[in-house]
Image (tube, rainbow, N blue to C red):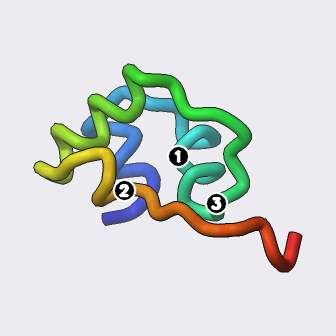
């Protein structure tokens, strides 16, 4: 699914989705997590993984 499609389906801003996709977002709104989880029929843990900041 393209970023534009995710934005259309969730009502989220394309820029916010792009930041999440590129893993450069500094924060994530709970409402955005809820919308993404509903769209992809998944849990929050399926969207994110914990890792160290090596390489940044």
Q: Residues within 10 Å of mark 3 (few under 14, many from 20)?
A: few
For the point 17% across and 38% down, which residue is it? 38
Q: Is residue 43 left or right of residue 32?
A: left
Q: Quadrant of residue 1?
A: bottom left
CA gap, disc 2 to disc 1? 12 Å
For the point 45% across and 55% down, which residue is it? 3
Q: Element type at marker 1?
A: helix
Q: Element type at marker 2?
A: helix
The residue labelled by disc 2 is: 47
The residue labelled by disc 3 is: 23
- First in residue order: circle 2 vs circle 1: 1
Q: Which quadrant, please, contains the C terminus?
A: bottom right
For the point 61% across and 68% down, which residue is it? 51
Q: Which mark is residue 17?
A: 1
* Mark 3 touches mark 1? (CB < 8 Å): no
- First in residue order: circle 2 vs circle 3: 3
Q: Which mark is residue 3?
A: none
* Mark 2 touches mark 3? (CB < 8 Å): no
Q: Nearer the viewer, residue 45 or 19?
A: 45
Q: Nearer the viewer, residue 41 or 4?
A: 41
The location of residue 36, given as percent across then percent down, is 30, 41
Q: Element type at marker 3?
A: loop
Q: Quadrant of residue 39?
A: top left
Task: Report the mark closest to the observer, 3 or 1.
Answer: 3
């Amino acid at each position: 699914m393209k970023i534009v499609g995710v934005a259309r389906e969730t009502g989220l801003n394309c820029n916010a989705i792009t930041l999440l996709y590129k893993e450069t977002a500094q924060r994530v709104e709970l409402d955005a997590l809820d919308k993404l989880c509903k769209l992809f029929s998944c849990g929050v843990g399926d969207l994110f993984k914990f890792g160290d900041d090596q390489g940044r």
